[in-house]
Amino acid sequence: MKNRSQESPPRRAASAAPRRLSKEARLRQLLDVSWKLISDEGTDALTLGRLAAEAGVTKPVAYDHFGTRNGLLAALYEDYDIRQTALIDAAIAASKPSLNEKARVIAASYVNCVLTQGREIPELLAALSGSAELAVVKRQYQLAFIEKCKQILAPFSGTQGVSQTSLWAMLGAADALSQAAVVGDISEQQAQDELAETIRAMVKRSK
């Protein structure tokens, strides 16, 4: 048997190579870094080159995920939409089956989500103004939100349900009230209360 001095020295662990993220995990990282950049410095500071530098990746990685700066901004809006939808769905599922409660939850969830993003969403929309990417993403979100509200409010509305015209008007009110709360023209509670009343009145008119 070899004595201890004759034994081969234990192998040292090889230096761990930098962990390679999956495509989905890398996308999440790039989106998180982008949100932080917008929050810290504003939308003008966000370019694909700057994002790559802040995220510690090469420029081709950022371009592979988003294609263009507008593609990145549209992806951020879609990311915001997904989180907003998840919050509203969870709140609705936990709410009581009454018109007052459903209206209150829709209003509170919508306003809270906009306020959580602070200045980022208005700046994002301004930066994407007129872009084809935003038009597609925003319209998909608007139609999905309107359909969701129509289904939630159907048990309390007339046989024809709430009209599309009324639902579009409600969405416009939701956006306007939320942005007024963001800049401090009205309080968060005032925005929620007015939006909830708008929803209740809309449903009552449908009967």
Image (spheres, grey):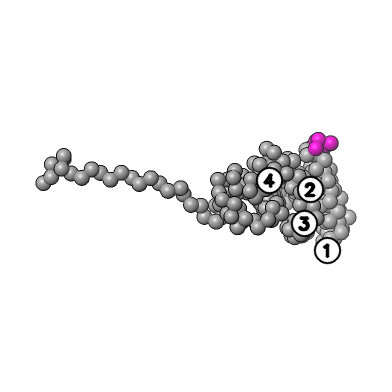
Amino acid under disc 1:
Thr
For label 4, the SS is loop
- Whether 5 is among the magenta residues is no
For label 3, the SS is loop
Q: Position of residue 30 (x, y in %)?
A: 60, 49
Judged left or right of residue 17, residue 95 is right
Disc 2 or 1, which lies upstream in sequence?
A: 2
Q: Circle 2 sits on which residue?
A: 126
Instruction: Please report the bounds of the magenta region as a residue range.
Output: 183-187
- Name the mark on residue 131: 3
Looking at the rendered image, the disc whose residue lies closer to the viewer, 1 or 3, is 3
Image point (67%, 48%), residue name: 47
Q: Which image quarter: residue 160?
A: bottom right
Looking at the rendered image, the disc whose residue lies closer to the viewer, 2 or 1, is 2
Disc 3 or 4, which lies upstream in sequence?
A: 4
- Name the mark on residue 46: 4
Amino acid under disc 3:
Ser
Task: Tell me the crowding category of disc 3: few under 14, some 14 to 19, or many 20 or more residues within 10 angstroms, Cα based.
Answer: few
- Look at the numbered discs 4 and 1 and tell me whether their residues touch, using CB distance below 8 Å: no
User: How far is disc 3 from disc 2 in space, using C-alphas?
Assistant: 10 Å
Image point (46%, 49%), residue name: 19
- Look at the numbered discs 4 and 2 and tell me whether their residues touch, using CB distance below 8 Å: no
Q: Position of residue 40 (x, y in %)?
A: 68, 37
Image point (60%, 48%), residue name: 52
- Name the mark on residue 159: 1
For label 2, the SS is helix
The image quadrant where one finds the C terminus is: bottom right
User: How far is disc 2 from disc 1 in space, using C-alphas?
Assistant: 40 Å
Image point (87%, 59%), residue name: 165
